[in-house]
Image (tube, grey):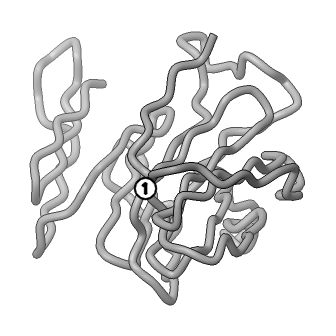
Amino acid sequence: YIILKGDKDLYTINIESGNIVAEKRFDVSFSLGDWGYNTMQFDDNKLTLWDPMGEKVWKYEADSKFYNYDLIKLNAEGLLDNNEVVPTAIVGSKNGVLRAFNMDGGWFGWNILRWSAATGASTSRVWVNSLRAFCLTEKDSLFTFDIVSGKKINSIKLDHHNYLRHFR
């Protein structure tokens, strides 16, 4: 399939026939991100995962607006580069809480949230690399977390909060 995303709609097109096999329209504009074969919808403080057919996989509602995120995705063969980690969304919020979400919420979608950690300030940027999540806050602090456990590894004070990432 090919998935087309607009600001208020989502279409799933059959690659062979070119026919629309699923379509989903929303009442409000939102931010969409690819996550494996699924689509993540960010709408203020709500995070929803949709499958390619436009069916809701799970929904999570937080107590604060979501700001920035990064994803651990499957590679082209549908596998992870590191088999210690499952597909994860690391999402920061306005109230300074960083959350890790599982793509597969398990039976009944009860295991969506893997871990959460307070950073003390609004999220400015979020990055993932290998088994680490990095969160830069609007109070110029850079936190490093273990992606699997959510354990804080380190925090350092920087001189501003608009750095860009470059991994080597």
Q: In this view, does 131 lie above or below 88?
A: above
**Pointer 1: what residue?**
68
Comparing 105 with 128, the one in front is: 128
Q: Which quarter of the image is occupied by the C terminus?
A: top right
Q: In this view, does 6 lie above or below 98?
A: above
Kindly state the secondary structure of the residue where label 1 is placed: strand
> Measuring 60% from the left and 11% from the top, which residue is drawn there?
77
Residue reaching furthest to the bottom: 63
Q: Where is residue 80 in the image (x, y as percent from the top left)?
A: 71, 22
How many numbered markers are drawn?
1
Q: Residues within 10 Å of mark 1 (few under 14, many from 20)?
A: many
> Measuring 13% from the left and 62% from the top, which residue is drawn there?
25
> Measuring 51% from the left and 50% from the top, which residue is drawn there?
159
Comparing 117 with 27, the one in front is: 117
Q: What amino acid is found at the position of numbered circle 1 in the picture? A: Asn
Q: In this view, does 11 lie to the left or right of 88?
A: left
Q: Where is residue 94 in the image (x, y as percent from the top left)?
A: 44, 76
> Measuring 77% from the left and 62% from the top, which residue is drawn there?
114
Q: Which quarter of the image is occupied by the N terminus?
A: top left
Q: Is residue 163 left or right of residue 145?
A: left
Q: In this view, does 110 lie above or below 42?
A: below
Q: Where is residue 45 in the image (x, y as percent from the top left)?
A: 39, 79
Comparing 38 with 85, the one in front is: 85
Place residue 167 in its image quadrant: top right
Q: Position of residue 162 (x, y in %)?
A: 39, 46
